[in-house]
Image (cartoon, grey):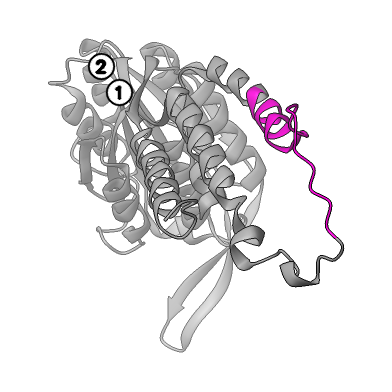
């Protein structure tokens, strides 16, 4: 405990530690032979004097030890020990980001580990952790779209909502236009100079109330940059299908409208990515993270609290103890 306390101590005036060089000199001055004349008495026997030692003689040096401890405590107090506590303030310009996540039934395909949806949620959560100063929200879509979490800086709440996402929350389908439009709606009133949507899907648009091209034009009109991610391996992927006899695995063709996703990204100033496995999906979000850097500055302030008072009290205690002992137990004259 004492070690931990001293490890956090900062001394404002460390030059006073040079006074510790006087301690060896004081010890030498105390133990050196006295340079004064002494009388001589010749006696025939010293038996009548006894041993000449007592507990007072043995402990007489404790008075000098108390004086040294008092001096050492005063030097420590003069060095001004302090404990510092850091405070950080963050200023700058963040980015508003909406994550638009496809939760259609095909997102349960197991060409990713453990499946597409869980893989997408994991990399999205890691992306959120790397953006501490940004407002981020979450939109889910299948046959329709829904805002799971509006723009927020409370990323713990956002990630909690993200991990609560599961297939079946919405009517099945792939309404890319609706998902994109809902994301734009959430960014429409944003005052941020940079507004971004990351739209992830594993299929082709096949429903919804809004055409994807119309949603794209709306995004352009509000200055929203859209990054699109097509998720799925090449060829066929195993997908769990519910049947009257239970869940069976069925191989389905991976169909991603890459032309549409590329067009949306290009015309809004974003970029299209294709993720074929967990590693490439993670790399895509890291690349987007690098492309969309927030501008912020962290300032650190250190507040110091003076801790010299215990050493002053210790010095007074040692002086008082020496004085009391000198006038009582170690008194030289009655």
Of 147 and 231, nearer the camera is 147
| Residue 195 visible in the shown view | no
SS of the residue at dot 2? helix
| Residue at far left of view | 189
Q: Which mark is residue 213?
A: 1
Q: Which residue is mark 2?
A: 217
Q: Residue at x 62, y 26 (%)?
A: 20
Determine which quarter of the picture holds residue 138: top left
Of 183 and 132, nearer the camera is 132
> Considering only vertical position in the picture, is 262 above or below 170?
above
Q: CA distance from mark 1 to mark 2?
A: 6 Å
Q: Is residue 37 left or right of residue 68?
A: right
Of 22 and 260, nearer the camera is 22
Q: Residues within 10 Å of mark 2 (few under 14, many from 20)?
A: some
Is residue 157 magenta-colored?
Answer: no
SS of the residue at dot 1? helix
Q: Residue at x 46, y 53 (%)?
A: 331
Extent of the magenta region: 22-43
């Amino acid at each position: 405990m004492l070690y931990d306390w001293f490890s956090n101590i900062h001394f404002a005036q460390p030059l006073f530690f040079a006074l510790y060089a006087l301690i060896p000199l004081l010890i030498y001055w105390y133990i050196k032979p006295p340079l004064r004349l002494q009388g001589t008495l010749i006696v025939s026997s010293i038996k009548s004097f006894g041993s000449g030692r007592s507990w007072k003689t043995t402990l007489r040096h404790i008075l000098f030890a108390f004086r040294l401890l008092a001096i050492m405590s005063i030097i420590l107090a003069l060095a001004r020990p302090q404990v510092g506590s850091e405070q950080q303030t963050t200023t700058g310009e963040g980015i508003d980001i909406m994550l638009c996540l496809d939760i259609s039934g095909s997102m349960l395909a197991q060409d990713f580990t453990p499946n597409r949806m869980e893989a997408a949620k994991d990399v999205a959560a890691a992306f959120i952790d790397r953006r501490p100063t940004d407002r981020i929200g979450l939109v889910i879509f299948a046959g329709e779209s829904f805002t799971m979490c509006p723009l927020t800086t409370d990323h713990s709440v956002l990630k909690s909502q993200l991990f609560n996402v599961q297939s079946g929350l919405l009517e099945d389908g792939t309404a890319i236009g609706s998902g994109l439009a809902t994301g734009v709606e959430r960014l429409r009133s944003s005052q941020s100079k940079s507004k971004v949507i990351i739209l992830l899907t594993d299929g082709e648009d096949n429903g919804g109330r809004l055409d994807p091209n119309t949603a794209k034009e709306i995004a352009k009109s509000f200055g929203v940059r859209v990054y699109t991610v097509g998720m799925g391996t090449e060829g066929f992927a195993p997908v769990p299908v519910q049947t009257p006899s239970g869940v069976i695995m069925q191989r389905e063709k991976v169909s991603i409208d890459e032309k549409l996703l590329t067009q949306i990204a290009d015309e809004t100033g974003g970029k299209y990515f294709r993720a074929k496995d967990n590693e490439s999906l993670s790399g895509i979000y890291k690349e987007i993270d690098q492309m969309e850097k927030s501008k912020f500055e962290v300032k650190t302030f250190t507040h110091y609290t003076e801790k010299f008072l215990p050493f002053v009290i210790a010095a007074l205690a040692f002086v008082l103890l020496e004085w009391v002992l000198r006038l009582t137990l170690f008194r030289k004259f009655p």
